[in-house]
Amino acid sequence: MAGCAGSARTATDYRLKARNSAKAALSAVETSTLAARLVRERRAFSTYVSVVLDSAERDVTAVESTFSSIQPPGKSSDQLRSALGNVLNDAADTISSMRIASRRDARHDLLAAADKLPKLQSDLQHYSDLPA
């Protein structure tokens, strides 16, 4: 995540920071997807899943916080900041909901929250593929 911190002097630099942030968040979403699959297949205890999701939540929250602290270099970058910021926020909220459900041993609620993960993966992959 250190790669997405700091100032952005140009639109290109800002896109690179956005791309790195999306890649880091995508990793947390993919980890959460694997955790949901374990729950769906009844192959893990909720205590294990809650630890995995806690870690993923901390990761995506750190990415979200770091990215939101970067000053866009100009108005042309404001749309990217807003759009990716919304996806990062949705990812953090989704993983948080999954963690809470896991700690409550609420399998159905965890899987319902996990239904949002494929769209988040797709959106984050889009930002991960931004050109330099």
Image: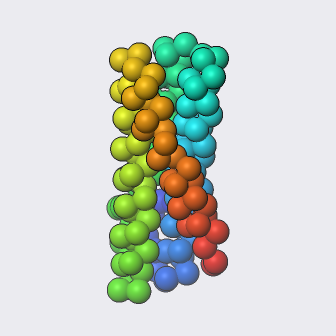
- In the figure, 107 relative to 74: above or below? above
Looking at this view, is 24 or 44 the one in front? 44
Residue 61 picture location, percent across and down: 40, 45
The residue at the point 56 percent across, 67 percent down is 127
- In the figure, 84 relative to 40: above or below? below
Looking at this view, is 106 or 49 the one in front? 106
**Snapshot quadrant of residue 100:** top left
Looking at this view, is 34 or 130 the one in front? 34
Looking at this view, is 118 or 87 the one in front? 118
The residue at the point 55 percent across, 81 percent down is 12
Residue 78 picture location, percent across and down: 36, 78
Q: Quadrant of the C terminus?
A: bottom right
Residue 62 picture location, percent across and down: 42, 46
Q: In the image, is 91 to the left or to the right of 22?
A: left
**Snapshot quadrant of residue 67:** bottom left
The residue at the point 43 percent across, 74 percent down is 80
